[in-house]
Amino acid sequence: MDRLKKSLLEAPIIEKEGYHYFVHPISDGVPMLRPELLREIVIKIIRKAELDDVDKIVTPAAMGIHISTAVSLMTDIPLVVVRKRQYGLDGEVSLSQVTGYSESEMYVNDVYEGDQVLVLDDVLSTGGTLAGLTGALEDIGADIRDIVCVIKKADGTNKLDEAGYDAKTLINVQVIDGEVTIVDEHGDD
């Protein structure tokens, strides 16, 4: 994970309403995402995730899409994107997303009772998005086989933990004094 670690250590930090963000190609789409960084991340996800019997990858829009698309291409597992727009399709399920900086509704389509799903996302910070998503997947009756996030902001407890789920991560970081600090370069298993 040399490229991911290096890119995080070089990431600029911005403050928005008292919340410190690192700006990174995986979480923000800027600066430019280099293919070798994405490749490194996808290989690590495939090695770390529990993929046995998974029949769908589920990712929240928007910044999980590029990662999940690459994993889908490498594993031939279909991809479901949880959208911020309601389409009104049969079986559509809404969920509330509450993060450290926003609150909104998201919509799940094409996930059904009995589906074996891998949940993928870019960053685990407050856990609000994934807590809402796992709750919706439970309500649908899907079996969450694994949850993997590329980066974890290790700033304490998060709503995903409170919901009773553990996420595997590739690397854990904190923002301290305006810089990214690597807390665990191997992430959580």
Image (cartoon, rainbow, N blue to C red):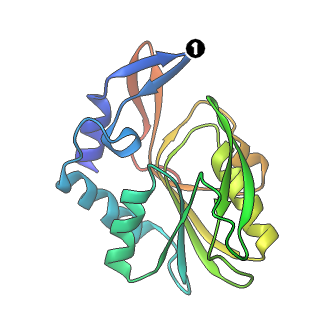
Residue 126 in which image quadrant = top right
Residue for point 38% across, 59% down: 67
Amino acid type at mark 1: Gly
- x and y percent of residue 72 in the render? 39, 74
Q: How many marks?
A: 1
Residue for point 47% across, 16% down: 15
Q: In terms of depth relative to the viewer, which is nearer, 161 or 98?
A: 98
Which residue is the extreme one toward the front?
88
In the picture of the structure, the residue carrying the numbered disc 1 is 18
Q: Is residue 74 above or below residue 59?
A: below
- x and y percent of residue 28 in the render? 38, 39
Q: Is residue 47 left or right of residue 49?
A: left
- x and y percent of residue 60 in the render? 55, 56
Q: Is residue 128 left or right of residue 141?
A: left
Q: Dot 1, crowdedness within 10 Å: few (<14), some or many (≥20)?
A: few
Q: Is residue 153 above or below residue 50?
A: above
Q: In terms of depth relative to the viewer, which is nearer, 106 or 67?
A: 106
Q: In terms of depth relative to the viewer, which is nearer, 95 or 156?
A: 95
For label 1, the SS is loop
Q: Is residue 123 left or right of residue 45?
A: right
Residue for point 63% across, 63% down: 87
